[in-house]
Image: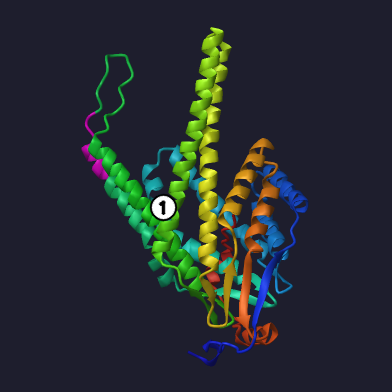
């Protein structure tokens, strides 16, 4: 370890608090969003890298910590190269799938699984390496060995479903044949097959939770500002509890919506019985369409509170349990109930406006989360920034990932 890697001693003095401030505006961002959507449609998706860069720069530029905004300095050329590479691979996969080249499809699927950790690591290296605050840059210093070790749930998931696929195929009884000239009957699914499928779903969920935990833990612990690494406290059990609670919220939401629909059906059926009328012809068609749309809307509305709950609880878990070496820590006062209600309201408005409320919803949610975060540190901010600037290395990141410009921007 060289002199630049020694941690900064925890400064003594009064505890300073610096809250995050977001100055973005829904109407202003609506203009950015609309231009991005229109140009992406007109260019058949080729404008996507420009749209992503503009979006990230808007949110970074309007987010301030200690009166200083964040910056996103990624070269556009590298983002375009990364996008074109992914687009070419996607087109090749679709062509192979639609032309019956099963061997090529299998090989490409295996290759995608093997390369997915490299893609994630390159994306994090690229995204964080081009994030600036007060001239300081973030650096993701995880080695490729660390990235692949953290990615073991990806390979466990692939092996799980490979084994389950062969097992279910071996257990499946022969599909009964119908009379000549008629469609064959559906294959029989035995209770054992249902049980194996359920077991596979549960194990898959646990693998996905573990993958999320591994990636977030690695991202925090191996991200540096200057020579100071991130500090991480959560454990895997914290993630499992949040996921289980989110499933519980989803089940309760489904039960509530089913109850409301059942009550409405009873009232509708009672009115129809009293009037002596029976739906027929066009009314039956309209009723079927209404039921299908209602079912889709019910699933959407049931999932919205659960996803909002999970996002809020995960945000609290992360920002109340991470810091920077021994020099700083973060706290958030985000309220779960308030965020869930905001998410539900935004979802309803987005449906009613056919999606045009989405930019305003995104601004509202980002503001509530970002402005709930406070940075706590001892001593003056300026001396600390000066020390971190002296520790900052000139060379950083991975040359291949940075040159290609992989960037996973939602």
Do we see residue 279 in this rendering? no
Q: Main secondary structure of the magenta part?
A: helix
At label 1, counting other C-alpha atoms closer than 10 Å, the crowd grade (few under 14, some 14-19, many 20 or more) is few
**Can you give x and y, in whole percent of width and height, for residue 137 in the image?**
63, 75
For mark 1, give the secondary structure: helix
Q: Is residue 289 above or below residue 40?
A: above
Do we see residue 385 in this rendering? yes
Compared across the picture, whether 31 is left or right of 253 comes to: right
The outermost residue toward the bottom is: 3
**Can you give x and y, in whole percent of width and height, for residue 350 in the image?**
65, 41
**Can you give x and y, in whole percent of width and height, for residue 215 in the image?**
46, 64
Residue at 59 percent across and 83 percent down: it is 393
The outermost residue toward the top is: 276
- Inspect the magenta stretch and tell me whether residue 172 lies in it: yes
Compared across the picture, whether 57 is left or right of 257 comes to: right
Part of the protein shown in magenta: 166-174
| Residue at image mark 1 | 244
**Can you give x and y, in whole percent of width and height, for residue 80 in the image?**
63, 58
Residue at 62 percent across and 60 percent down: it is 369
Residue at 64 percent across and 45 percent down: it is 346
- In front of the other: 376 or 196: 376
Q: Quadrant of the C terminus?
A: bottom right
Residue at 41 percent across and 52 percent down: it is 244
């Amino acid at each position: 370890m060289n002199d630049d890697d020694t941690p900064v001693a925890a400064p003594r003095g009064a505890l300073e608090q610096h809250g995050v401030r977001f100055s973005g505006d829904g109407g202003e961002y609506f203009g950015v969003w609309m231009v991005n959507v229109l140009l992406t449609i007109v260019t058949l998706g080729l404008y996507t890298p420009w749209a992503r860069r503009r979006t990230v720069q808007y949110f970074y530029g309007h987010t301030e910590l200690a009166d200083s905004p964040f910056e996103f300095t990624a070269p556009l050329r590298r983002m375009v190269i990364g996008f074109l590479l992914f687009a070419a691979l996607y087109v090749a996969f679709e062509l192979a799938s639609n032309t019956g080249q099963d061997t090529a499809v299998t090989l490409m699927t295996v290759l995608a699984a093997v390369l997915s950790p490299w893609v994630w690591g390159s994306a994090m290296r690229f995204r964080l390496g081009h994030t600036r605050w007060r001239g300081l840059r973030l650096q993701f210093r995880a080695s490729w060995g660390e990235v692949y070790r953290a990615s073991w749930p990806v390979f466990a998931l692939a092996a799980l479903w490979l084994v389950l696929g062969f097992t279910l195929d071996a257990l499946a009884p022969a599909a009964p044949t119908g009379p000549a000239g008629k469609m064959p009957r559906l294959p029989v699914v035995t209770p054992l097959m249902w049980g194996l499928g359920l077991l596979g779903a549960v194990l898959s969920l646990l693998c996905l939770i573990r993958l999320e935990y591994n990636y977030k833990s690695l991202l925090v612990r191996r991200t540096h500002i200057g020579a100071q690494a991130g500090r991480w406290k959560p454990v895997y059990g914290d993630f499992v509890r949040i996921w289980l609670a989110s499933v519980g919220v989803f089940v309760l939401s489904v039960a509530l919506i089913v109850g409301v629909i059942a009550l409405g059906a009873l009232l509708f059926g009672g009115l129809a019985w009293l009037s002596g009328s029976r739906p027929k012809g066009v009314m039956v068609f309209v009723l079927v369409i209404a039921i299908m749309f209602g079912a889709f809307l019910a699933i959407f509305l049931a999932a919205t509170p659960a996803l909002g709950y999970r996002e809020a609880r995960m945000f609290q878990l992360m920002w109340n349990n991470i810091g920077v070496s021994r020099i700083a820590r973060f706290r958030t006062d985000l309220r779960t109930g308030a965020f869930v209600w905001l998410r539900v309201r935004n979802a309803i408005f987005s449906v009613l406006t056919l999606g045009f409320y989405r930019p305003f919803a995104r601004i509202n949610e980002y503001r509530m989360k970002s402005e709930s975060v406070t940075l706590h540190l001892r001593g003056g901010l300026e001396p600390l920034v000066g020390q971190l600037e002296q520790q900052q290395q000139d060379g950083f990141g991975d040359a291949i990932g940075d040159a290609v410009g992989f960037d996973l921007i939602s």
